[in-house]
Image (spheres, helix red, strand yellow):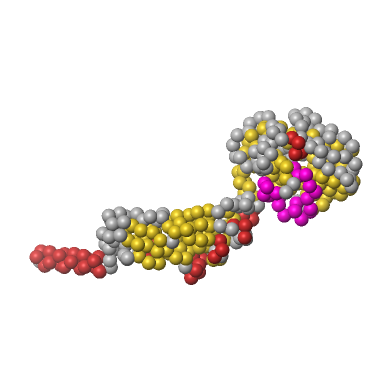
């Protein structure tokens, strides 16, 4: 009986070995070198071109030179969507180009040279959509592992703002390198993105110069949550309890002023909140009394977070203000100071224009991670 059992075991081993040989499990096959089958490319407004590389690999050293060709396979978009429960679109042809579509593994090696793709023209893409670019090994003078021959580049809009500064009980002053660009302004636009936790003080300060030209929130006999423009020629607008700002919400506030006509407009989230006239003459902001988060004294801080502070020497239109709360091109015409508050560390905030008028915090800045706009989450 034992003899028959031994024969049975030997036959079973022969069958198993034959099965392993027949399914090709021990063949030296080519595959794309990656821990995952997908990779994200996140882009923001004004994003520069991005170059990506692909490499293929063998399990064992090549016996001869292996020539590899890649191609984009649009037919696999559906495969990607079904596999990842997504609704991605094929990346348009004008948004990528091959720098090198071929690669090689030299005899004796296991890792290929790099294939390279350039992703470009992000400004043409819709940030609310997801795009995919399936890239496959199309040809090689060796067997290709089917399950690892394709890599999916997934392209989507990143958050425009990923970090902001909390200036509660803090303020910032300017290290003026070029103050002249902010002086003698006959036209002015000032903007900021703020999220305030409370309006418990009579006055909270956004930015400007006390007694000259200042964006603040609240005043004596004035709602503590209403925007007010304080100048030495009078304040604007009048008190109105219906114009208060909310707490714990991101709000974009803006002021435009034209000294020639005296026209002054306050915008909240791109909508006109107050409009009138004020004869305040040309505006000088480029001096040591310009602060963000401070006015008469240190107790008029903004109890919350701030981002996207800007000064322009033009009157921006309502459409321009409404369309760009989270980002503008630093080279935009008329932009003379641009403090994004996106450093994430330290106490110096860069002026993103060429003028180099950085601001420095009085105390250590606290930084808060965010994702703005919310639709980019």
Rendering coords of residue 325 (x, y %): 71, 50
Note whether 86 is above or below 312 in the view shown: below
In this rendering, position of residue 181 left or right of residue 262: left
Give the main secondary structure of the magenta stretch. Answer: loop
Q: In which quarter of the image is residue 202?
A: top right
Of 158 and 334, the residue lying toward us: 334
Instruction: Give the residues in magenta.
Output: 311-332
Residue, x 62% and y 54% (percent of image)? 376
Of 103 and 366, the residue lying toward us: 103
Residue, x 61% and y 60% (percent of image)? 125
The reply to whether residue 201 is visible in this rendering is: no
Residue, x 69% and y 39% (percent of image)? 355
Rendering coords of residue 225 (x, y %): 80, 42
Note whether 310 is above or below 10 in the view shown: above
| Picture quarter with the N terminus | bottom left
Rendering coords of residue 67 (x, y %): 35, 62
Of 213 and 298, the residue lying toward us: 213
Rendering coords of residue 366 (x, y %): 63, 36
Inspect the magenta stretch and tell me whether residue 140 lies in it.
Answer: no
Residue, x 45% and y 55% (percent of image)? 53
In this rendering, position of residue 268 left or right of residue 47: right
């Amino acid at each position: 009986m034992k003899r028959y059992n031994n024969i049975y075991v030997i036959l079973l081993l022969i069958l198993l070995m034959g099965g392993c040989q027949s399914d090709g499990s021990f063949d030296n096959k080519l595959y794309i070198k990656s821990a995952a089958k997908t990779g994200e490319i996140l882009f923001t407004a004004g994003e520069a071109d991005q170059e990506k590389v692909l490499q293929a690999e063998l399990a064992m050293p090549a016996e001869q030179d292996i020539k590899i060709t890649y191609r984009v396979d649009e037919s696999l978009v559906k495969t990607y969507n079904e596999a990842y429960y997504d609704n991605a679109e094929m990346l348009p042809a004008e948004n990528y180009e091959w720098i090198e579509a071929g690669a090689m593994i030299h005899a004796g090696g296991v890792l290929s040279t790099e294939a390279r793709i350039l992703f470009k023209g992000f400004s043409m893409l819709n940030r609310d959509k997801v795009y995919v670019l399936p890239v496959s090994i199309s040809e090689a003078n060796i067997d290709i592992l089917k399950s690892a021959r394709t890599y999916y580049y997934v392209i989507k809009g990143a958050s425009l703002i990923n970090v902001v500064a909390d200036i509660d009980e803090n303020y910032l002053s300017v290290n003026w390198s070029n103050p002249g660009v902010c002086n003698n302004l006959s036209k002015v636009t000032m903007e900021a993105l703020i999220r305030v936790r409370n309006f418990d003080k009579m006055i909270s300060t956004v930015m400007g110069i006390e007694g000259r030209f200042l964006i603040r929130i609240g005043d004596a006999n004035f709602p503590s949550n209403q925007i007010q423009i304080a100048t030495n020629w009078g304040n604007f607008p009048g008190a109105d309890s219906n114009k208060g700002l909310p707490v714990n919400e991101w709000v974009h506030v803006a002021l435009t002023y034209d000294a020639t006509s005296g026209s002054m407009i306050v915008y909240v989230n791109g909508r006109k909140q107050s409009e009138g006239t004020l004869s305040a003459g040309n505006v000088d902001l480029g001096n040591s009394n310009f602060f963000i988060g401070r006015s008469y004294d240190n107790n008029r801080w903004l109890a919350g977070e701030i981002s996207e502070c800007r000064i322009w020497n033009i009157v921006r239109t309502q459409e321009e203000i409404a369309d760009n709360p989270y980002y503008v091109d630093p080279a935009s015409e008329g932009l003379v100071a641009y403090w994004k508050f996106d450093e994430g560390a330290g106490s110096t905030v860069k002026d993103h224009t060429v003028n180099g008028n950085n601001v420095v915090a009085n105390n250590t800045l606290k930084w808060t991670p965010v994702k703005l706009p919310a639709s980019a989450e």
